[in-house]
Image (cartoon, grey):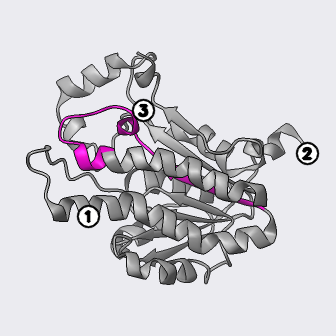
Amino acid sequence: MTEAGLFDTKGKIACVTGASSGLGRAVATMLAEAGAHVVGIARRDDALQTWRSETRGETAALVADLSDRSELRAVADAASLPYGPPDILINAAGINTRQTADEVTAEGWDVTLDLNLAAPFFLAQAMVPAMKDRGWGRIVNFASLQSRRAFAGGLSYGASKGGVEQMTRAMAEAWSADGITVNALAPGFFPTELTGPVFANPELAARNARQTCIGRNGEMSDLAGPLLFFCSNASSYVTGQTLFVDGGFTAK
């Protein structure tokens, strides 16, 4: 296999949650334009159709509420209909209620843990048998700076993302012997709907940029290399790892 071939995802079937906006949309687009057949999952059909119309490559849309745990196996089955069982699962959907510790509600806690932590696991659990049959699979979870850092108003979000990092290790231990690698990307500050309040404050956005070693906040193109690494044969001996794509934010 050539060096270029190591990062090849052409013809692979990928399922991306949260594909209607933000980082999920960005990575769904990257995979489609790299030649994968991409099924994008999100709650908003109009946003999914906009993504499809603006993306080159093979794409399909699946409207689903991933916070409803009882529906996740049916979602996994539906995701296999357009192209077949996925080779790649990207768990990018997420929510941040931004409730302080004194304000956290049971409802906010439950929806955060269900969408950020339970959905990635149960979707993967449902898709893993087909990956085992092929002896090849790639699962990429989305962790966060808050997997290791405590931010104001981020108690339930941080708890869920800390869980994602450990869940990634546990999933790797369970399934990697069957040819399925499981890793996580932990983005720094990228301009998305979730980080809208941060970027709406120029002083705060600039302060976050200064906190990085590189001296700027993230751009969507910064995710392409790490994503294709984790989704291809280039990472065949890398599993259970969390890669912080944060410009060195966590290094300072």
Mark yes or no: residue 93 visible.
no
Kindly identify which numbered label has been placed on residue 1: 2
Is 178 placed above or below 207 here?
A: below
Kindly identify which numbered label has been placed on residue 218: 3
Query: Residue type at mark 1?
Result: Asp
Report helix, strand or loop for mark 2.
Answer: loop
Kindly identify which numbered label has been placed on residue 110: 1
Magenta includes 150?
A: yes
Taking the image as shown, residue 52 lies to the left or right of residue 42, namely right
The quadrant of the rendering that contains the N terminus is top right
Report helix, strand or loop for mark 3.
Answer: loop
Q: Do the residues labelled 2 and 3 touch (CB within 8 Å)?
A: no
- Where does the image place residue 98, in percent across and percent down from the top left? 18, 47
Query: Residue type at mark 3?
Result: Gly
Taking the image as shown, residue 144 lies to the left or right of residue 40, namely left
**Sequence order check, earlier mark of 3 and 1:** 1
Residue found at x 28% / y 43%: 195
- Marks 2 and 3, how far apart in space? 32 Å
Mark yes or no: residue 153 visible.
yes
Extent of the magenta region = 136-158
Report helix, strand or loop for mark 1.
Answer: helix
Residue found at x 23% / y 42%: 154
As rendered, which of 180 and 203 lies closer to the eye?
180
**3 vs 1, front mark:** 1
